[in-house]
Amino acid sequence: MARIVMKFGGTSMAGIERIRNVAARVKREVDAGNQVAVVVSAMAGETDRLVGFCREASSLYDAKEYDVVVSAGEQITSGLLAIALQAAGCKARSWLGWQLPINTSDAHGSARIGEIDTAALDASLAEGVVAVIPGFQGVADGQRVTTLGRGGSDTSAVAMAAAMKADRCDIYTDVDGVYTTDPRIVPRARKLSKVTYEEMLELASVGAKVLQTRSVGLAMKENVRVRVLSSFEDGDTNDGHRGTLIVGEEEIDDMERQLITGIAHDKNEAKITLTQVSDRPGSVAAIFAPLADGGINVDMIVQNVAHSTGSTDVTFTVPAADLARSLDILDKAKEAIGYATIVHDTRVAKVSVVGVGMRSHAGVASTMFTTLGERGINIQAIATSEIKVSVLIEEDYTELAVRVLHTAYGLDAEDAA
Amino acid sequence: MARIVMKFGGTSMAGIERIRNVAARVKREVDAGNQVAVVVSAMAGETDRLVGFCREASSLYDAKEYDVVVSAGEQITSGLLAIALQAAGCKARSWLGWQLPINTSDAHGSARIGEIDTAALDASLAEGVVAVIPGFQGVADGQRVTTLGRGGSDTSAVAMAAAMKADRCDIYTDVDGVYTTDPRIVPRARKLSKVTYEEMLELASVGAKVLQTRSVGLAMKENVRVRVLSSFEDGDTNDGHRGTLIVGEEEIDDMERQLITGIAHDKNEAKITLTQVSDRPGSVAAIFAPLADGGINVDMIVQNVAHSTGSTDVTFTVPAADLARSLDILDKAKEAIGYATIVHDTRVAKVSVVGVGMRSHAGVASTMFTTLGERGINIQAIATSEIKVSVLIEEDYTELAVRVLHTAYGLDAEDAA
C-alpha cells in the first residue's frame, strides 16, 4: 500500500465526461490498494470567467472578496469528482480549504500555504475514503477564504503530499512529461524520464511551463517525489517510464546523468540600457533599488567597461509586462542615478541551457557561444548560474538558436517524433 | 436608524451590470442611515447549471456533495456584490454560511435553518459594514455545507431578519408585489398593498409563486415584516405604497380589510378516484397511510355517499408530478384497501378564493358555487379552510373561473391595466 496524491488540471476537469475519466483513473489506484487524495483544478475557462467578473465589478477589487469568488471554481469540481467517484464505486468525499483546514497566510490572492491539519483526513483515508481537495484554496486564521495565485493547484498538490507524507505526487496535465525543449520548435526533442528539482526550476522559470515554479520549489524543500504525466494517455500509471519524475539529485544515478538536460527559451523579456551612467560607488544601487521597491524582477545585468569619460552603460532585462512601469520608475530616479538616455527593446529573447551535469564539466558556455557564433547569432547579454547558462539574443533568432543548441549538446532523439 | 434585510433574486444578480444596480439600491438604504444585510441568490440559470452537472455525474448523487457544488453559485454572487458595494463607496463584506455561521439541520439538499450566530455580524454592522450573505446555504454541525432546497434564499432572508431582529425584510423580485390574481389571466387584477401571512401561505401554496412557502411560514412564526417589491422599479423604497407588505392580521385595520383577498389557481394537480372501496372502519386509513409514507401530499378528499352495496367511491388529488408514484403505491396496496378500479385524471385545476375576512362572513362559498354554476362550470370536489374555499374543476375552465370569481368578489380594479 502506498499513499499517493493525484492532481488534475482544468483540461482534465472540463465537463462531466472528463471528470468521469478522472474518476476511473483514481479508481485504478484505489483498486491497487493505495490511499488516495485527489487535488483538482476548476473546469478549464472557469477561473478566467470568475476573475473576469471581479475585474468587471471593480478594477480595484478587494482581494478578500476576489478569493471568495474565484475559489468557487475548484469547490464545484471537487464536489462533482466526489459524486463521480461514488458512482464508480469508490467511497469519496470533498474537503474544502476551510474544512481540513489548509491554513495559509492572509495575503489574499497570492497566499502561502502554512500548516495543513491532516488528523481528520488521515482517519478518513484509513477508512478507504478517497479525499477530493479543491486546489488553489485555503483559509487564513480559520476565518476567510484565501487563494494561492494562478496555477496554485500544483502547489496545493505538493503541499498536500508533504503534509500527508505521500509516497508520490502525480501531476496529471495535458502534456506527457518534461521535454529537452519545446517540441513545437524541435520535433526531435526527447521526453526526460527524470529531472532534478533544480533543473526543473530553471526550465520552468525560463519558459517550460509544465509545473508552477512555486510547486517545484516546495517539492524540493519538502523532498516530495513529483511525477508529471498526461491525463489523456492510458496505461499502467506505475510504469516508471510514464511521464517525467522530478526528484532530488541523489536519485539520479551516473548512468542516467546527462551533461545538459534541456534548452529553454523565453520571449517575455525586455531589455533596458541606461547610457553614460556615472562610474562612481552607489550608482548601480541607485538603479536597482527603486526597481526592487517597485516589485520588478530584474534578470540579466551587464555593465560595460567604463568609458574614458568616467561613465558606463548599464544593460539589464525585466519582464516585458513590467517594461512601462520600469521606464517610469527609472525616469523618476533619473537625477538620483545620473544617466544620459534610456534605450529599450522588447524584440529580444533569452535562451538557456540547463543541466546539473555542467557543474563538473567545463566548456558548456564555450560550446554555446561557438555554436551561436557560427550561425551569426549575436549575443547581447550573458548570465550564468551553477546549472544554467543564459544568453540574450534578437527575438527573430530564437527558434534557430534553440535548434542548433539542441543538436550541439547531443539532445536530439534518434527517431524524429 | 433601522436594521433591514434586503434580498435579491437570480434575475437581479444576472451579470455585473445588474449587480451594480443592486449595489446602488443598497447604497441608498445605507445613505439613509440604516444597518443593512443583503441576502443574494445565484445568477439566474447558474443553480440549474450546477444541478445539471450533479445529475449528469450521477443520477443517485450524494446530497452532501450536491450541496458543495450548488452552494457555489451564491458564494460567487456574494463576493461580487461585496466588490460592487465597495466600488460604490460602501464598506461591505461577504459572510458565507459556515462563517457566520448559519447552523442548519444535516438534511442535505433540504436543510432547515436552526440558530444563526449574529455576534460577529452585529459588530460588523455596527461599524457600518454592509453584510452580504449568500442565500440558500448553511452549515451542519460546523462541518459540512448544506443547502435549503430550491427557492431557499427567501427563507435565508427571513431567517436572517429574525436573527438580526431586523425592522423589515425587503424581498426584491421580478414582480412588483402580490396581486389579487394572476394579471396574465385577469388584466384588471389589483396589486395588494398588504396581505396577512395566512393569506400569503394560501395564495402561495395554490399557485401565486411570488415567495417560497417556507419563508412565509417562517416569517409568520418569527413575526418578520416582509415586503415583496420589484428590483426593476425605481423610487423611494420607504414609500409604503411600493410592493406588498406581508404582516400579521393585527396590522391590517378594518378599513383596509377585504372580504376576499385573492383568487388563486393551480393546474399541477391530478385527481384519483378509487371505486367501490369497502365501507368499513379503517378502509380510508388503508388508502392514505401508504401515500403519506411515500411522502406524497394528498390535498382535496371527497368520499361519496355509500352505495347500497356497502361500498363507496373515494376521490382525492395529489401533485401531478407524484401521480405515477401514487398509482404504483395504490396498486401495491390494492388488497389491503379493497377497491374495484383506479380512475385518474390530470386535466383538472384547483381554483381557490382566499381571505381572512371570510371568517366573519357567511356566504363566501355559496357565492362561489352560484357564480361557477351560472357559467356551467361543474365542481368535482370542494375543500375549505378557515380562510379559503377551493374547488376542483375541469382544466379548460380555469381562466374563465378565475375571471368570473374575480368580478363576483368585487376585486376588479376600476381602471384596467
Image (cartoon, coloured by chain):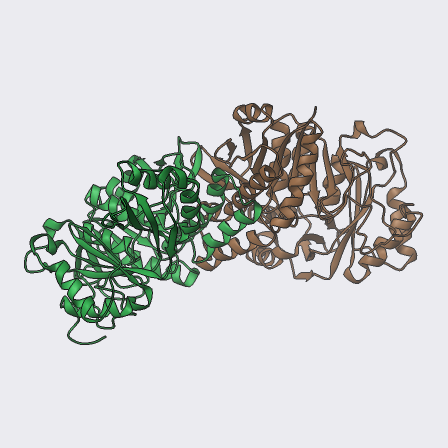
Chain colours: A brown, B green
For the point 80% across and 57% down, which residue is it? Answer: A398
User: From where the camera sits, is residue B69 visible?
Assistant: yes
Check the picture and name the quadrant holding the N terminus of chain A. Answer: top right
For this orientation, the residue located farthest to the bottom is: B415
Between B201 and A396, the one lying in front of the other is B201
Please identify the quarter of the rendering in which residue B182 is found: bottom left
Residue B156 visible at all? no
Q: Looking at the picture, how far across and down is residue A18, in whole percent? A: 65, 48
A334 up-or-down from A211: above or below: below
Depth check: give the residue in front, A275 or A17: A17
Q: Is residue A405 above or below residue B294?
A: below
Taking depth in this image into account, of A187 and B135 the one nearest to the observer is B135
Query: Left or right: A219 with respect to B82?
Result: right
Image-based side of A135 in relation to B124, left or right: right
Q: Residue at x 32, y 47 (%)?
A: B276
- State the image coordinates of residue A193 (x, y, percent, origin top left): 82, 38
